[in-house]
Amino acid sequence: MVLCNDRPKGFEMRNAVIITSSAQAEASVSGRLTTEFEAQLREANPGIRIVRRDVGVDTLPHLTAETVAAIRGTPQTDAELAARALSDALVGELQAADLIVIGSPMYNFGMSSTLKAWFDHVLRAGVTFRYTEAGPEGLLKNKKAVVIESRAGLYSEGAAAAMDSQEPHIRTLLEFMGIVDVTWVRAEKLAFGPDAAEESIAQATAELAGLADETLKLAA
Ligand SMILES: Cc1cc2nc3c(=O)[nH]c(=O)nc-3n(C[C@H](O)[C@H](O)[C@H](O)COP(=O)(O)O)c2cc1C
């Protein structure tokens, strides 16, 4: 894990947005770790405002003609305008956040389709990124992200690393919007037996506690 402490002195973290995306609600490892991290963030940063969206349970629509018109075009119909309003709300939460926390289960080697739907709603040309003569530019600057991943296998090293389509994809999407200061916390080997799972979850819990205490605390 790489901790990035490159904030200017006096930086204050006031706003966070938390996105969880497991289909399994209460039984979710990434959801549980995210909830614990939220509590630690609140304790370390009194006054922090946190918006939480569980897109794994309160799912967002997949792309349709209406949502594409809303997100990448000019909305006109009532359905398109409603889709634009939803995208605007999600983008507004992201723009307001100093910290973005994402809980991401691995499903079939990638992120959940529900988290992908969230990304589909917030990657907006001219709003969260733009194309310039020099190429694409992310428009969300000076933000930190913490991505909490849960998966049955081991992908951070070893033979299955090349099969990980979750972390590289999430990294690409965040970086495309300008969010380059990302800390990855992984609960892996969850299907390698109770001892391996317990050890991995304990390790992730310790990493998150350290992040909340040391990296993200409000400047005095
Ligand atoms: C539909 C489905 C597909 C999954 N695919 C994978 C996979 O490709 N690789 C893997 O390591 N684990 C896979 N898993 C296991 C989950 O990543 C694991 O149960 C993890 O804890 C899910 O996160 P959660 O507990 O936050 O819901 C899959 C689980 C489900 C339900």
Image (cartoon, rainbow, N blue to C red):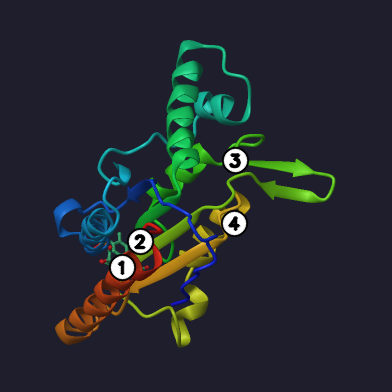
The span from disc 3 to disc 4 (Cα, nearest Å) is 11 Å
Disc 1 from disc 4: Cα separation = 25 Å
Left or right position of 203 against 6: left
> Where's ligand 1: which quadrant?
bottom left
- Mark closer to the observer (2, 3): 2
**Residue 135 on image: x %, y %:** 78, 50
Q: What's the residue at 32%, 39% (across, down)?
A: 59
Secondary structure at badge 4 equals helix
Q: Secondary structure at mark 3?
A: loop
Reading the chain from its start, which is encountered first: label 3 or label 4? Answer: 3
Earlier-in-chain disc, 4 versus 2: 4
State the CA–CA distance, disc 2 to disc 1: 6 Å
Q: Nearer the viewer, residue 37 or 214?
A: 214
Task: Find the distance from the CA under tag 2 to the CA under tag 3.
Answer: 26 Å
Tag 3–tag 4 contact (CB < 8 Å): no
The answer for how far apart the CA atoms under marks 4 and 2 are is 24 Å
| Residue pictured at 32% horizontal, 74% vertical | 207
Q: Residue type at mark 4?
A: Glu
Point out the tag, 2 or 3, that comes first from the N-terminus.
Answer: 3
